[in-house]
Image (cartoon, rainbow, N blue to C red):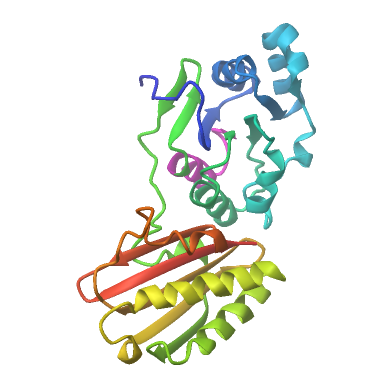
Amino acid sequence: MTPGPLDPVPSGLVHLGLEFDGPDDLTASALPTLRRAIDGGDEVVVAADRATVRRLREALGADAGRVAFPPPATLIRASEPDFLAGVLDWVRPGRRTTVLGQYPPWMSVRDCAFGEDAVGVVRGDLPLTLICCARRDLDPDLLAVLRRTHPQLATAIGVVDNPDHRAPATASPTPAALWGAVAGRVGVEGLGDLAALRRCVAEVAARAGLEGDAVRAAVLAVHEAAVLAVRRGEPDHAHLTLEVRARPGQTLFSELTGPHGIPVQPGPHGDPLAHLRPFCARAAVHDEDERRAVRVLSTV
């Protein structure tokens, strides 16, 4: 493998996987990325087992004093319900943060896969470098998650592209496996009964763990998405379907579908969804042969 591209000062999330056999192997693979982070002025956090911490302290020398080594149990895991909210605690104004953590053997494969997939989709703009480490003798299904969900790998020769990476299906079809089961479904005719859509979103949002202004923002985003979904010559007669998927404590995903309408205009700033984005984490519009789908993602 050859080193992959890594900007001198990355602007968003750098999501790295690292497979290892033991403390010496992990240290050798992580060291180039950790040194780069230290030299670049990152806040660096390493939550690893004691043997690995000892090896890293020895390898880093005086620079070890610029690294925080909290107990592994204090680091939020990708499999935990509040992972997407928890990573926000690592962000520092005007400064990148590099975090190294290890997969524990007891971690849920299903929940880990969700967290690893979703952090790239939802938190891709954060100034973070995440180094997710897994022993090669872990559950093969956990190793498969690490290999599939990380675009690049941390190795002894630096960061390299990961040929096993598979991006989650966030476009079409609806990514049920990623965003959860359908928690609410409603159909309306045109724009005459958008109150039914708003009620559905509000009810599911509350069950998912959103509160107060977060619920109102999710409802407003879906309302605006509904208008966009039926933007055509006769919106009052267009059938519109809303499906809401939820992972409690994590995300609320809404998909609105209607007939393929008039072309979506780019808007004053080149983005047809610019007015909607302040009220959600992600939004996208997909025009297909027979329908238009507008998808809105909110986080808890």
* Count of numbered circles on the image: 0
Q: Quadrant for residue 251, please give it.
A: bottom right
The residue sitting at 73% across, 40% down in the picture is 75
**Residue 58 visible in the shown view:** no
Seen as rendered, the residue at the extreme front is 268
The residue sitting at 65% across, 29% down in the picture is 95
Q: Position of residue 257 (x, y in %)?
A: 36, 77
Q: Position of residue 148 (x, y in %)?
A: 43, 43
Q: Position of residue 105 (x, y in %)?
A: 65, 43
The residue sitting at 45% across, 61% down in the picture is 283
Seen as rendered, the residue at the extreme left is 289
The residue sitting at 37% across, 84% down in the picture is 240
Q: Position of residue 9 (x, y in %)?
A: 51, 24
Bounds of the magenta span? 132-148
Question: Image check: 274 left or right of 299?
Answer: left
Q: Quadrant for residue 99, please give it.
A: top right
| Quadrant of the image containing the N terminus | top left
**Residue 237 visible in the shown view:** yes
Question: Image check: 73 left or right of 264?
Answer: right
Most foreground residue, 207 or 103: 207
In reply to whether residue 139 is colored magenta, the answer given is yes
